[in-house]
Image (tube, helix red, strand yellow):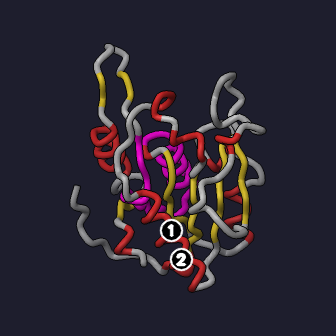
């Protein structure tokens, strides 16, 4: 999907929010086949860009309460992937889809830091990343959604048909752009 260039806000006023980049999300048998093999490389590029300019970085970790989930605390799958290295300015933990419904309070922290919003990257495009973007937009934050720094996994629709990760990613971009967020590419941000 080609995303047109957008006029971007001052990136120094936006936190990079890295959502759920955890080892357990590599389990294709549990989650389904994924798209975007460049996701982690693009996240690394965004982290490098934000840190080199001393912009704020937020890591979000999903601490699942679901039995059998690879993302449960104490399981190896709960750990961040190697790309999520170094200390963040803020670590948010959550057990639901939105980083704004975790602890500590992301919305309050953004306000305390005098920031205007966030750039979202991570996993999964159509779940926790999309939900974080929707809530952030509803709270009045400027939200940039780095689509190529996210990935989704195939899902089964209620009617039993398979929906590919690529289709889910395209629908997320369609749902968010111009309504809750501005959908961008990594190369527009670094």
Percent x, y of residue 100? 64, 49
Give 109 or 77, whichever is nearer the viewer: 77
Quarter assignment of residue 1: bottom left
Q: Compared with residue 85, is residue 124 higher up or lower down, i.e. above or below?
A: above
In which quadrant will I find the C terminus?
A: bottom left
Quarter assignment of residue 145: bottom left
Count of numbered circles on the image: 2
Mark 2: few/some/many CA within 10 Å (<14, 14-19, 20+): few
Magenta includes 141? yes
Tell me the element at label 2: helix
Percent x, y of residue 37? 37, 53
Which residue is at a point 21% across and 61% down the rendered structure image? 2
Region of the chain picked out in magenta, as a range: 126-152
On screen, residue 38 versus residue 113, left or right, reads left
Q: Compared with residue 86, is residue 64 higher up or lower down, i.e. above or below?
A: above
User: How far apart in space, not on screen, are marks 1 and 2 (Cα)?
Assistant: 6 Å
State the residue position of label 1. 44
Tell me the element at label 1: helix
Which residue is at a point 71% across and 53% down the rendered structure image? 92
Which residue is at a point 34% across and 54% down the rendered structure image? 177
Give 116 or 55, whichever is nearer the viewer: 55
Magenta includes 173? no
Check if mark 1's residue and mark 2's residue have beta carbons within 8 Å.
yes
State the residue position of label 2. 48
């Amino acid at each position: 999907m080609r995303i047109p260039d957008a006029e971007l806000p001052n990136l120094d006023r936006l936190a990079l929010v890295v959502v759920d980049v955890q080892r357990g999300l590599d389990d294709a048998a549990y989650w389904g086949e994924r798209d975007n093999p460049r996701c982690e490389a693009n996240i690394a590029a965004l982290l490098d860009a934000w840190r080199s300019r001393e912009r704020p970085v937020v890591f979000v970790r999903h601490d699942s309460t679901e039995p059998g989930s690879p993302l449960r605390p104490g399981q190896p799958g709960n750990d961040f992937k190697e790309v999520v290295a170094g200390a963040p300015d803020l670590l948010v933990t959550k057990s639901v889809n939105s980083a704004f419904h975790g602890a500590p309070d992301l919305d309050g922290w953004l306000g305390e830091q005098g920031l205007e919003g966030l750039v979202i990257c991570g996993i999964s495009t159509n779940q926790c990343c999309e939900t974080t973007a929707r809530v952030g937009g509803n709270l009045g934050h400027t939200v940039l959604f780095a689509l190529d720094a996210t990935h989704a996994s195939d899902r089964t629709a209620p009617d039993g048909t398979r929906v590919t990760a690529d289709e889910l990613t395209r629908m997320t971009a369609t749902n968010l752009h111009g309504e809750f967020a501005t959908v961008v590419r990594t190369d527009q941000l670094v």
